[in-house]
């Protein structure tokens, strides 16, 4: 099934991709589909989880696995609302809150001011669960960013500069191998899409990513063996071996 045929069938199922359909070259038969999600007057997501699951099942029958990457304007509001709720209730502990959502599952990441004891983690979990239940989201984990080594946008860009053009799964594997924590593959795809929208990345054919001229200029360069250009040449040579 071609990407145009996938798009056509998605349309028949009432789903309209927001941009390209990205093939995952590392996993045969897997495609990433970007969808814009809205909310009805009662706050329920459109398209619903039921509609997404029906679509996934329909494509599985064709031997194709779809991963939906949801761009939800309300998603930012949900994260902001959860952040405000937790900081208001536990401001002496919580400095910041990040939310990774995959389908109806939510992984809450806490930037804490101090160590989170098990009892406090339980309190955070309960407050987050109460808030997110209004959006039909289930908390599956509450983690601290302390020591988690989650990559920053700058680190993502530096790694992409060396490996580009790079598939998302290859980038994820490289970062994980270096000891960085990626909340989920969907989190990574959303970060990459955000960088693309800001003009720092371009998505190439076959779903690979590369830096734009603007990004290269912003990152700058340097001479010597630690130069990113030298690192990139070494990476290319390694891939050709």
Image: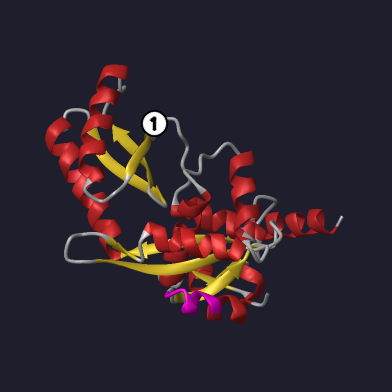
* Residue 1 placement, left or right of 240: left
Does residue 218 show up magenta in the picture? no
Q: Between 17 and 25, which is closer to the camera in this rendering?
A: 17
Above or below, 11 relative to 109: below
Q: Is mark 1 on a helix, strand or loop?
A: loop
Can the viewer see residue 192?
A: no
On screen, 179 above or below 13? Answer: above
Quarter of the image with the N terminus in it: bottom right
- The residue carrying mark 1 is 146
| Name of the residue lying farthest toward the left | 88
Q: Which residue is drawn at 21% across and 38% down?
A: 130
Q: Quadrant of the image for the C terminus?
A: bottom right
Magenta part of the protein: which range?
A: 9-14
Q: Main secondary structure of the magenta part?
A: helix
Q: Is residue 90 shown to the viewer in this render?
A: yes
In the image, is 87 to the left or to the right of 99? left
In the image, residue 122 lies at what x, y percent? 28, 24
């Amino acid at each position: 099934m071609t990407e145009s045929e996938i798009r056509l069938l998605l349309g028949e199922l009432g789903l309209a991709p927001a941009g390209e359909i990205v093939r995952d070259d590392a996993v045969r038969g897997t495609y990433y589909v970007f969808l814009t999600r809205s909310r009805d007057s009662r706050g329920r997501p459109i398209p619903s989880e039921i509609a997404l699951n029906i679509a996934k099942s329909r494509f599985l029958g064709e031997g194709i696995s779809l991963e939906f990457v949801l761009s939800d304007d309300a998603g930012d509001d949900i994260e902001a609302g959860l952040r405000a709720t937790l900081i208001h209730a536990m401001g002496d502990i919580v400095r910041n809150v990040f939310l990774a959502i995959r389908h109806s599952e939510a992984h809450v990441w806490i930037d804490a001011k101090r160590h989170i004891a098990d009892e406090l983690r339980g309190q955070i979990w309960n407050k987050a669960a109460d808030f997110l239940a209004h959006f039909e989201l289930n908390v599956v984990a509450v983690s601290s960013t302390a020591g988690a080594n989650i990559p920053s946008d700058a680190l993502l860009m530096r790694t992409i500069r060396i490996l580009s053009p790079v598939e998302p799964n290859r980038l994820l594997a490289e970062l994980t191998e270096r000891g960085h924590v990626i909340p989920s593959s969907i989190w990574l795809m959303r970060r990459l899409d955000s960088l693309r929208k800001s003009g720092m990345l371009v998505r190439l054919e076959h779903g690979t990513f590369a830096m734009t001229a603007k990004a290269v200029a912003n990152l700058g360069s340097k001479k010597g063996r630690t130069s990113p250009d030298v690192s990139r040449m070494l990476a290319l040579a390694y891939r050709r071996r």
